[in-house]
Image (tube, grey):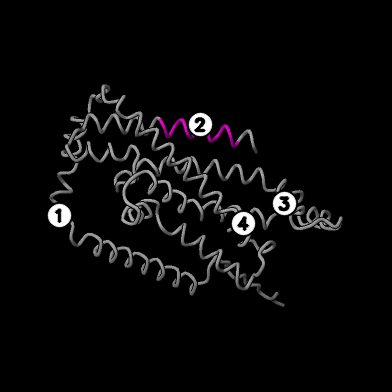
Amino acid sequence: MNEPQHYSQLWQWRTPRVQLLLWAGWLALVALFVWCWQVMTQDTIWAFVLDAPAQAADIGSRMVPPRWGYLPELMAPLWDTLNIATLGTLGGVIMAVPVAFLAARNTTPSVALVRPVALFIIVTSRSINSLIWALLLVAVIGPGLLAGIVAIALRSIGFVAKLLYEAIEETDARQIEAIAATGAGRAQVLNYAYLPQLLPAFCGISVFRWDINIRESTILGLVGAGGIGLKLQASLNVLAWPQVTMILLLILGTVVISEWVSARIRRAII
């Protein structure tokens, strides 16, 4: 008597239908990329693109050596840039704290009304680049350091408030309930329950944002908002490439030092 034969089906990670859909998706993605590339490059003059390496080499040769004698003239604009970043960060942090508490689910007075307004403020601040803020403010309040400070502050609100309200929502509810069970008022709960948990995160977020703002404040002068960007724009306008090199080296050094200071402060706090 013949024994029954057992047939084993070959296992596949994806079924033929899924594989076909996957290949169709990749094909559609490639087609979309080709179409987007054609749209973006339809006005491109490829002769200029082919000549770009030679032009870059020519400009690079003119930028060397840097004009070291120009350094003393950059100290005052550099100080203005640091002030723009520092005061702008301070203003942004001050405005971001109440927005963060209004956006957090566990501290907002109204999830249905107040929280969406706070989230809208956060999204608006984060959606508009600091350079655009500066461009608008220069048109409103005129050129100068004030426009740069306010631009940095408005840009910082969304960044600080978003990270801070997420930290508020992650606070340990047991500590808050324990403080509230003693009969403490709202201010006391905030001071003894929320503040100890939020202080390390708040300080780390503030220092991190200050480090970012130093980078952003270096270019605000391109639209008239003060700082070392004014010197950079003036040097570019007259094709003073050795001065441009000196400014770029100074900006690079400033960013490296601010990154080191920011890292040390965050390490000491956290």
- Disc 1 crowd rating (10 Å Cα; few below 14, some 14-19, many 20+) is few
Q: Which amino acid does the dot numbered 1 rest on?
A: Ile
Q: Which amino acid does the dot numbered 3 rest on?
A: Tyr
The verdict on residue 256 being magenta is yes
Give the residue drawn at x 67%, y 44%: 199
Give the residue drawn at x 50%, y 45%: 89
Disc 3 or 2, which lies upstream in sequence?
3
Quarter holding the C terminus?
top right
Give the residue drawn at x 40%, y 54%: 129
The residue identified by callout 3 is 194
> What kind of element bears circle 3?
helix
Gap in Å between the C-alphas at discs 3 and 1?
58 Å
The residue identified by callout 2 is 260
Q: Which amino acid does the dot numbered 4 rest on?
A: Tyr
Instruction: Give the side of residue 213 with respect to residue 206, left or right.
Output: left
In the image, which disc is placed on residue 45? 1
Q: In terms of depth relative to the viewer, which is nearer, 266 or 203?
A: 203
Gap in Å between the C-alphas at discs 2 and 1?
42 Å
Residue 18: % across, % down: 49, 72
- Disc 3 crowd rating (10 Å Cα; few below 14, some 14-19, many 20+) is some
Instruction: Give the side of residue 133 with respect to residue 100, left or right.
Output: left
Disc 1 or 4, which lies upstream in sequence?
1
